[in-house]
Amino acid sequence: MSGPSDFQPTNPALKWIERRLPIMGLMHSSFVAYPTPRNLNYWWTFGAILSFMLGVQILTGVILAMHYTPHADMAFKSVELIVRDVNYGWLLRNIHASGASMFFFAVYIHMFRGLYYGSYKEPREVLWILGVIIYLLMMATGFMGYVLPWGQMSFWGATVITNLFSAVPYFGETIVTWLWGGYAVGNPTLNRFFSLHYLLPFVIAGVVVLHVWALHVAGQNNPAGVEPKSEKDTVPFTPYATIKDLFGVSCFLLFYAWFIFYMPNYLGDPENYIPANPAVTPAHIVPEWYYLPFYAILRSIPDKLAGVVAMFGAIIVLAFLPWLDSAKTRSSKYRPLAKQFFWVFVAVCIGLGYLGAQPPEGIYVIVGRILTVLYFAYFLILLPLLSRIEKPRPVPNSIADDVLAKTGGKPAPMVSTVIALMVAGGLLLGGADSARAAEGSTKPPAQKWSFSGPFGKFDRGAMQRGLKVYKEVCASCHGLSFVAFRNLAEAGGPGYSVAQAAAFASEYKVKDGPNDQGEMFERPGRPADYFPSPFPNEQAARAANGGAFPPDLSLITKARSYSRGFPMFLIDFFTQYQEQGPDYLVALLQGYEDKPPAGFNLPQGSYYNTYFPGHAIKMPKPLSDGQVTYDDGSPTTVAQYAKDVTTFLMWAAEPHMETRKQLGLQVFAFLILLTVLLYFTKKKVWANAH
Amino acid sequence: MTTASSADHPTRRDFLYVATGAVAAVGAAATVWPLVSQMNPDASTVAAGAPIEVDLTPIAEGQDIKVFWRGKPIYISHRTKKQIEEARKVPVSSLPDPQSDEQRVKPGHDQWLVVVGICTHLGCIPISHEGAYDGFFCPCHGSVYDTSGRIRQGPAPTNLVVPPYSFVSDTKIQIG
C-alpha cells in the first residue's frame, strides 16, 4: 500500500503468480518493509489489537450464527442451548459477548491516543474520518448484537434506541414503524437486526482496509509528532512493529481472558437473563457501558429532538476535529495547555459515562448538563481557541533525536496512566452497577460458596439435597424448563449416574404426541426430556397465584443481583466475586417476617420480605424447618434448605461453570508463558534498533 | 534477523525464537479445536438420538410403516410368505452385495424386515413395494432393492442398512 515493492519471490511458482497478481509484493511492502517510526509507544499497539478483535468477533459471530435462531419465540432459548448444549458453546458465547466490550475498550484507547498525539492533523484527516465512520458502524453493530439474545434489556434497549428516531420532525413515527417492521419491536425487528448484525462487521472490515490504506499513504504519526526525515527515524514493520504488536495483543488477551473465564457476567446486565417481556419495562434501562457517555448527553437535554441531535452531534463533532484544532504542533507532549485540557476532557467523558448509568434525577441531571456543555466546549470553543493562543514548546528535530533524548528516561507516565485508566474504567462499570440498585431493599449478607473463585467447584451433596428441595417445594409453582434430566448425570453436575438420571426422569409424566390417532398423550419422562413446568402457560400460572407469575428458576441465580456499591464492585473484579444472585436468593428465602415493621403498608395478598425489592412479595414463605427430609444427616433447617437449593439453582443456571474455571486456569498458564516469551523476544529484536 | 549479533550468542537467541514460535503454534492449534468441535451434534441432539421402541401389532401382513430414528426414516415391513421365499430363493453369490436374508433379519422373526430407508447411492428415500423385485425402488437414480432390502440393480453400491435393533417382546422392537 505504499508504492510499488521491489519484493521478488525466488520460488518459480510464486514468481509466476506474482507477475500476474503482485499480492505478495503488496503484503511485503505493507506489512514487512513498511517503515514505521521507531519511537512508537505501546498506545500504538491498539491498532493491531483492534484488528485482532474484529477478527475474533467475526469468527465467533459466524459460528454463533450457526446455532442461533432469530425468532422472537426461540431466540432466548437458542442462546441458552448454545451455552448449555453446543460443544464449547459457553466459551464461544463468552468470547463474543465479552469481545464486544473489549473491542470498545480498545477503540476508546485508540481514539484517545489519536486525540492526545494529534493523529487527526494534516495529512491524516481522511484517516481520522474513516476511523469515526468505523466507530459509528461499531456502535450500530454492537447495539444490534445486544438485541439478539432477546432478554429484557435486549428488548427494551431496542425499543428505546429505535424510538430515538421518533424525534425526527414530521416523519418520526413513519421512520420508527419502518425500522420495526410492525407497530412495536417484535419478530420482524429481531430478524432484520440479525441480518444487519451479520452484515455490518464485514462493512467495518471494508472500511478498516481503507483506514489502513490511508494510514500507509500518510505514514504513522508518532509520540513526537514530527514526520520521519531519514532512514534513522524508522524501522521496518517486520520484525519490529510485528513483534511489539504481538506482545501487545498477548497482554490484552490476558485482560480479555479474565472476563471470558472468570467474570463473564461482570459487564452484562442480570435483566438480560429474563426473557423479553413486552408488558414489563425493567426499573432501570441502562445501555451497555460503552454507550453510557452518549446516553448521559441524551438524557441531560430536556427537549426530545435536541437530545437526540446532541447525542449524535457528540460523535459527529469528532469528524470535524482536524479543522477545529488548527494548531501546527501535533503531539500534546509539546502543548502544555492542550495536554492538561486533554485529561480534563478524559475526565469529562468518564464522568458522563458514570452519569449515564445513574437514575435521571436530582443532582445527576444538573451535573450531566454541566458535563455535556464541557464536552462540546472542548471541541467547539477550547480547541479552536487554544490553537490560536497557546505557545507550544519546541518539538524535537527528528524522531531519532526524540529517541536519544528519551534513553535513560523512566517509563513512569505510561504506568500511571494505565492505572488511572483502570480506575476510571472501574468507575464507569461501577456506575452501571449502582444503577441496578433496587430501591428499598436491604443488601443480602455475603455467603461462603464452594463454587466461588477461580478454583470453585459445586458441592455435590448440596446439589443433590437442593434438587430434592426444588422437587418437593419449589416445583409446585416454579418451572426449570432449560434443565433436562440428562443434565443430572453430566460432569460438573449433581453427580448422578446415567441410570439414576433415567430413573429420576421416569418418575415424571411428560406430554408427548400426537400419536397415530392424532392425540396427545402422557408418557414417563426420558433423560432427553426437560423438567416439566407446573403450569401450561403464564395465564394459568397467574390465575393460580393471585396474579403473580412465579418465574422459571433455570436462570434465576443469574437474573437476580443487587448493587455492590463503590468500591466493592472494583474489588469484585479482582476477587472474582460473582455471587450476588445466590446471596440474594439465600437471603430472600430466609428473609420473611411475620409482621411488617410499623408504618409499612403491606398490600393485600402480599408477604413482608426484608430482601425483596419493595419488601412486598407475592410468594408466601416457602420453607419451614423439617419440611424436607434429608438422608445424609444434614440439618433440616430453612437456612440449610435455602443454601442447598441455591447451590442447585446456580448449577442449573450455569451447568458448565466448573469446566469454565478449569479451562480458564489452563488458558492463563498458557497466556502468561506466551506473554513472557513474547516480551523477551521483543526485547531481543529491538536490541538491534537501539 | 539472524545476522551480525546472532553470531555472538547463536544458541540462546535462536532458542528464544523457536520457543516463542512453538508456544504460539501450540496455542493456535488448541484454539482451533473448539472452533471445529462446535459443529458436531450438540448434547440435546445426541440425547434425542436415544433408542426408541416401536409396537408392531398394528402392522398387518404385507404392510409396512415408516418411523423416524435419529432423523432417519426406518422401514419396518411385515413381509408375506411369498416375499420371504423370494428373498431366500436367490443365490447369494449372484448379488452385488452378497448377504443372505437370514443375516438381515432376527432369528425367529423372519417376517419382520427393519431397514434404514435411505438409498446407499446418494441418500434419497426409496419407495416401498416398487420395482422389479417387489422391494424398494429409488426414484432418484433408479436403484432397485429386493424384499430383503438388498441392492439388485442400479448405481447403489450396497444393501439398505439394517439399523441396530432388538426384539423386546414378540410384538415390540427397540431401535438403537
Image (cartoon, grey):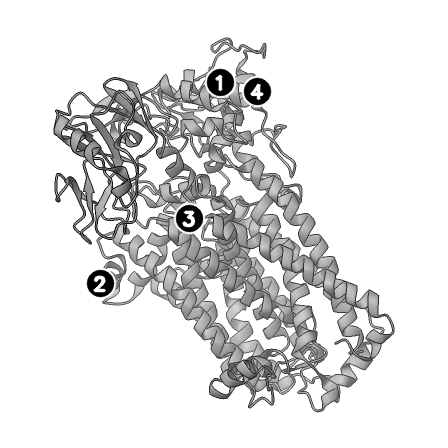
| Residue placed most toward the observer, B102 or A76 | B102
- Tell me the kind of residue under disc 4: Gly
- Tell me the kind of residue under disc 1: Glu
Question: For this view, does A450 lie left or right of residue B99?
Answer: right
| Residue placed most toward the observer, B22 or B105 | B105
Q: CA distance from mark 4 to mark 3?
A: 39 Å
> Looking at the picture, how far across and down is residue A450, in whole percent?
62, 29
At numbered mark 1, what does the secondary structure look like: helix, strand or loop?
Answer: strand
Residue A593 circle label: 1
Question: For this view, does A59 lie left or right of residue A253?
Answer: left
Sequence-first disc among 4 and 2: 2
**From the viewer's perspective, is the residue at label 1 or at label 2 nearer?**
2
- Residue B136's place in the image compared with A583, above or below, is below
Sequence-first disc among 4 and 1: 4
Q: Mark 4 packing: few (<14 Cα in 10 Å), some, or many (20+)?
A: some
Q: Which residue is mark 4?
A: A461
Residue A636 circle label: none
> Looking at the picture, how far across and down is residue B84, in whole percent?
18, 29
- Residue B123's place in the image compared with A378, above or below, is above
Residue A174 circle label: 2
- Residue A494's place in the image compared with A94, above or below, is above
- Tell me the kind of residue under disc 3: Ile
Q: CA distance from mark 4 to mark 1?
A: 29 Å
Residue A285 circle label: 3
Q: Are marks 3 and 1 in contact (CB under 8 Å)?
A: no
Q: CA distance from mark 1 to mark 2?
A: 52 Å
